[in-house]
Image: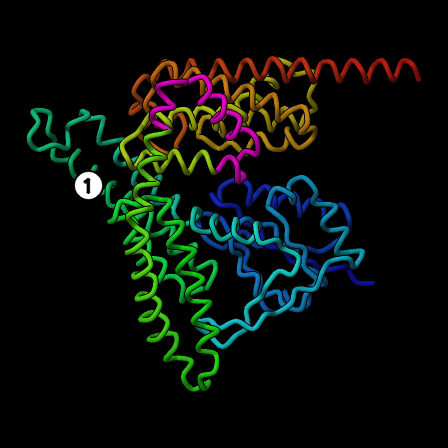
Amino acid sequence: MSKIKIVAATGCPTGIAHTFMAAEALEQAAKKLGVEIKVETHGQVGIENTLTKEEIRQADGVIIAADKDVQAERFVGKPVIDVPVAHAIKDAEKLIQTIIDGKATVYKAKKQESDTTENTASTSGSSIGRQVYKHLMNGVSHMLPFVVGGGVLIAVSFLFGIYSADPNHESYNAFAAMLKNIGGIGFGLMVPILAAYIAESIAKRPGLVVGFIGGMIAYTGGAGFLGGIVAGFIGGYIILLLGKLLSGLPKSLEGLKAIFLYPVLGIFLVGTLMTFLVNPMTTINEAMMDFLSGFQDANPILLGLIVGSMSAFDMGGPVNKAAYVTGTALLSEGNFYFMAGVSAACITPPLVTAFAVLFFKKYFNQSERNAGLVNFILGSTHITEGAIPFAAKNPIVVIPILMIASSISAILTYLFGVQVPAPHGGFLVLPVVTGAVQWLIAILSGSLAGAFLYGLYKKREAQKERSAEIAA
């Protein structure tokens, strides 16, 4: 009897950790269950280990573990399991067993016009909320490199002085001004790219140009990232609507639709709508920024508690991303305080596990010790996902510990008034952090507190196991 063949596609918004952790978990589970699997990863560097048409055709089932668009239309007619990427990390064996047992739902095609004559797919089992989230995260995934690249260059320019890019100031430096200008261009593309790839996730290639134009209108009009999100969804669904309205045209005009009708009508419609929406969206955006800034000054403890809890709750998931995206949006408005707390809260969870393994070594097995020590590197570079394998073993206990630790780090960061002008990088951006020593103290305080709590929990569990063995 031949082995069951499974193909899979994994992808997370950042394309850094979850994507590859899920792939590794699926590969290990497949080996354990005696199943043949090939996993395609949609990481930040692009698509790797690409699935061929023949491999998909021969597959007995498909696992989509992604929070972004992974071109699911390829799997029409195949038994498919479509879950968030975190599910593959925690329940890889269960997902594969579902395929083995023949309980996966067949992916069905839905007639939908796009820039080609091919049908696209719809996930019959996916909720509307999950689809909206995947569209949003597709935009965030493509936006992040612009935010990180541009933000770090702007941050580096501050090494020459906070006013070094101002030609009228005595500290003016031409190289610093160039860095800030280049970084500013990258940052300026954040909103249009966000909108473009939300629309692209909804309507494929025809949505790209419409979303980009809507995003540019939102950016130039001051509507910020909220305006970009609205523009992306409006643009994408405008293209879907046009596809239905133009479905009666002859097949010979398919090329005309893609190159002429979709962009011209789509840009006109999204431009008209966004022109009317940009002013109220700008008002909402400014009100939100003012609210968060005022909150930061009036009650930094409560703000730190909220930011810390959000960042550690799902470590790279939608709640974590809500805090992170808000931080990057505020960075573009010149607010460097909010991101300082977000970064501290994201750095803390992996450091908690690393210090716990270091100080309570005998209560962890060898694989946990190895993973914990690696988390010193992951945490120091702002990769929160390193803590997931530890949290997955007992989320009811471990996640609250991580939330407490991240909240301590964020609260202290806000109380110290630390400013972090870069959206990513962890301790690599310490040279450009205002209040770098205080920031380190805040993060280490939260991390050590969490490590102590986590270590005590592991010690208690070990004592319970020994007592049970003695009683037996």
Residue 322 placement (x, y as % from top left)? 47, 37
Instruction: Classify residue 70 as left or right of residue 381.
Output: right
SS of the residue under disc 1: helix
Quadrant position of the C terminus in the picture:
top right
**What residue is rendered at 27% in x and 36% in y?**
153
Q: Nearer the viewer, residue 265 or 454?
A: 265
Q: Is residue 149 above or below residue 168?
A: below
Relative to 5, does residue 443 appear above or below in the rendering? above
Question: In which quadrant will I find the N terminus?
Answer: bottom right
Q: Does the magenta run of residues contain 305?
A: yes
Q: Quadrant of residue 429?
A: top left
Magenta region, main secondary structure: helix
Where residue 321 appears, as percent x and y from the top left, is: 48, 38
Judge from the rendering whether residue 274 lies leftward or rightward of residue 137; answer left or right.
Answer: left
**Residue range highlighted in magenta:** 292-321
Q: Residues within 10 Å of mark 1 (few under 14, many from 20)?
A: some
Q: Kindly identify which residue carries mark 1.
A: 181
What colouring does the structure picture have? rainbow
In the picture as drawn, the residue positioned furthest to the right comes out as: 472
Give the residue at x 32% y 34%: 331
Identify the image quadrant of residue 365. Answer: top right
Between 38 and 275, the one nearer to me in the picture? 275
Q: Is residue 376 left or right of residue 190?
A: right
> Residue 54 location, x and y as percent?
62, 69
Q: Nearer the viewer, residue 120 or 238?
A: 238
